[in-house]
Image: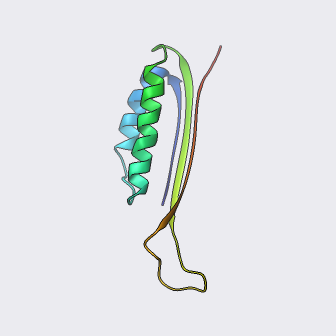
Amino acid sequence: MSWSINKTGKASEVAEQLVEELAKNPCQEPEETIRQEVGAVCATALAAMPEDQMVEVVAFGSQSPVYPEGGGDATGEFKNEVKLSLKPIYT
């Protein structure tokens, strides 16, 4: 499964939007825990900024099962990719 978030606006508003977005469509574990941790990192960073600071948050994650070389059933392990960009917009 994969997920993505792309929000732009005032830091306080983006923080609220992230909470709403991350409450939707939960992923399979451990991807869901990773997704929520990305949200927590964003919340910490956004809370440290002035409320009216314009920001852009772009986050993406993907999880795929690991299969043994030569084929066969999934091993029960997963590969996860996470990308996060959180930056202030200066006008």
Q: Identify which residue is drawn at 38% across, 50% down.
A: 33
Q: Identify which residue is drawn at 38% across, 60% down.
A: 28
Q: Considering depth in this image, is 81 or 25 the residue closer to the camera?
A: 81
- Rendered location of residue 10, percent (x, y): 49, 20
- Rendered location of residue 23, percent (x, y): 34, 43
- Tell me where residue 70 sits by quadrant: bottom right
In the picture shown, does residue 84 fall above or below 75? above
- Rendered location of residue 2, percent (x, y): 50, 56
- Tell me where residue 83 sits by quadrant: top right
Q: Identify which residue is drawn at 47% across, 77% down.
A: 74
- Here the colouring is rainbow
In the picture shown, does residue 26 fall above or below 84? below
Numbered circles on residues, count: 0
In the picture shown, does residue 5 fall above or below 63? above
- Rendered location of residue 37, percent (x, y): 42, 42
In the picture shown, does residue 3 fall above or below 15? below
Residue lying furthest left in this view? 23
Q: Considering depth in this image, is 17 or 38 the residue closer to the camera?
A: 38
Which image quadrant: the C terminus? top right
Q: Identify which residue is drawn at 41% across, 36% down.
A: 40
Residue lying furthest right in this view? 91
